[in-house]
Image: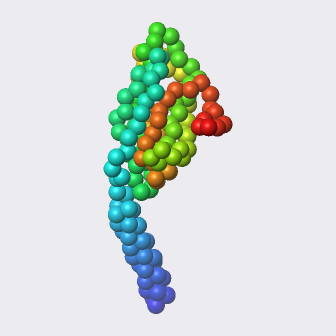
């Protein structure tokens, strides 16, 4: 009987530790995840694609851009990339690519693009045909 009580205490202690760690982790994450103000973007126009930015923000942990693209031509669009260049003020940080395998006539697709550049406060969004090794010279 003493052995069972001992094991029960250990299991109970593990459950309490797990709950405590989970609560503290969630509390810490909620205090860190503060939106940075002033995240801006520019869209480089493309004759084939219509862009609509639904949300663009950056936090201390990560950022994301939610956008919709629509094929505004009368042809199928295949094998293009959305390129997102991230900047901190005027300083280039990195580029992200999102592949669009195909987009039917009049079709609209939604994308969520996440990034980890916590200092980024500006994004330039454009369409390209291929992934460039050095997009910014």
Residue 71 on image: x %, y %: 45, 18
Q: Quadrant of the C terminus?
A: top right
**Residue at screen point 35% across, 39% down:** 55
Q: Is residue 110 visible?
A: no
**Residue at screen point 38% across, 73% down:** 20
> In terms of depth relative to the viewer, which is nearer, 18 or 25?
25
Residue 85 on image: x %, y %: 51, 39
- Considering only vertical position in the picture, is 94 above or below 4? above
> In terms of depth relative to the viewer, which is nearer, 35 or 39?
39
Rendering colour mode:
rainbow
**Residue at screen point 55% across, 36% down:** 97
Q: Is residue 83 visible?
A: yes
Q: Is residue 54 left or right of residue 81?
A: left
> In terms of depth relative to the viewer, which is nearer, 21 or 124?
124
**Residue at screen point 38% across, 62% down:** 32
Q: Is residue 34 left or right of residue 87?
A: left
Q: Quadrant of the N terminus?
A: bottom left
- Considering only vertical position in the picture, is 89 above or below 79? below
Kindly give the residue lying farthest to the top in the view shown.
74
> Residue 23: which quarter of the image?
bottom left
């Amino acid at each position: 009987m003493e052995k069972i009580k001992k094991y029960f205490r250990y299991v109970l202690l593990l459950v309490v530790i797990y709950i405590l760690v989970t609560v503290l982790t969630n509390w810490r994450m909620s205090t860190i995840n503060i939106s940075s103000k002033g995240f801006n973007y520019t869209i480089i126009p493309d004759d084939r694609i219509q862009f609509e930015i639904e949300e663009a923000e950056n936090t201390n942990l990560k950022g994301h851009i939610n956008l919709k693209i629509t094929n505004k031509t009368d042809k199928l669009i295949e094998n293009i990339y959305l390129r997102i260049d991230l900047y901190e003020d005027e300083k280039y940080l990195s580029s992200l690519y999102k592949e669009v395998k195909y987009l039917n006539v009049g079709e609209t697709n939604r994308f969520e693009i996440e990034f980890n550049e916590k200092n980024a406060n500006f994004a330039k969004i454009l369409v390209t045909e291929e992934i460039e090794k050095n997009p910014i010279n």
